[in-house]
Image: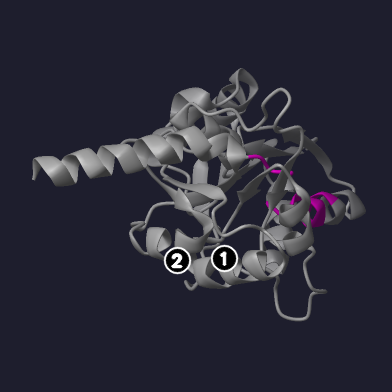
Amino acid sequence: MSATVYLVGAGPGAADLLTLRAARLLGEADIVFHDALVPKAILELAPGAQKIAVGKRCGRHSTAQRFINKRLVDAAHKHRIVVRLKGGDPMLFGRAHEELAYLRSHGIAVEVVPGVTAALAASAQIGISLTRRGRARSVVFATPRAAAGEAPSGWLEAVTRADTAAIYMGVGDAHAIAKGLVAAGKPAATPVALIENASLEPARAVYGILGELPVLAAGIGGGPALILLGEVLGDAVSAARQATARKAQAG
């Protein structure tokens, strides 16, 4: 059997943000290995496929990467179209390199289908560009997360130097992120936004400044959330403060 494994980006959650190629492959798939946060509406696009959850979520039981790798190879020996469905884009914080390398080392054909990553979905959700002519010419996607035994991450320097930053998997570490960035020279008054469930209903955004990040993060629910940081958010932060002041006066 000539099989192909497709690493497919499921995007931020909304089914209609999938690429046409992703939707077609789901419809043709024999088996789908999917992340924990892939919504039911997207999985329903693969009605004829066996669906296996192999997702990882911080602080919860998850499938070890080595077992995912092996299951993909085993599936490729039994099925023609194998889909590894990853939240966001497979090539950004999705451990795609490990799966690509393992599959290729076992002689399995593999292709990548891009998806909309969380930073772009969050930017679209709040209607604020991550770049701005004359003011924001650099954007960094970073995460403070590092597994045990890994080399320290250079996220702190990267975020400090960038005009705009998107911090993935950081809400639970908000206190350490704020403290580290301020100590590294990022002004505590730098505008921030936390966007939860971007592209889904109900999506929510909260605005403030870097010094307030732990308080803002404490108000986030259980949905996937992203931290945006930079002066491009300044007007939104000002508008949010004015709205809060008006509400307080009215109350």
Residue 28 pos. (x, y %) = 59, 27
| Apparent side of residue 120 relative to residue 220 in the rendered image (left or right) | right
Vertical placement of residue 180 versus 159, above or below: below
Visible in this render: residue 104? Answer: yes
Secondary structure under tag 2 reads: helix
Circle 1: is it few (<14), some (14-19), or many (20+) Cα within 10 Å? many
| Apparent side of residue 199 relative to residue 210 in the rendered image (left or right) | left
Residue at mark 1: 178
Secondary structure under tag 1 reads: helix
Mark 2 is on which residue type?
A: Pro
Q: Are marks 2 and 1 in contact (CB under 8 Å)?
A: yes
Q: CA distance from mark 2 to mark 1?
A: 7 Å
Residue 96 pos. (x, y %) = 75, 50
Quadrant of the image occupied by residue 116: top right
Quadrant occupied by the N terminus: top right
Residue 92 included in the magenta stretch of the image:
yes
Tell me where the magenta segment starts and ends, as one range: 89-100
Residue at mark 2: 214
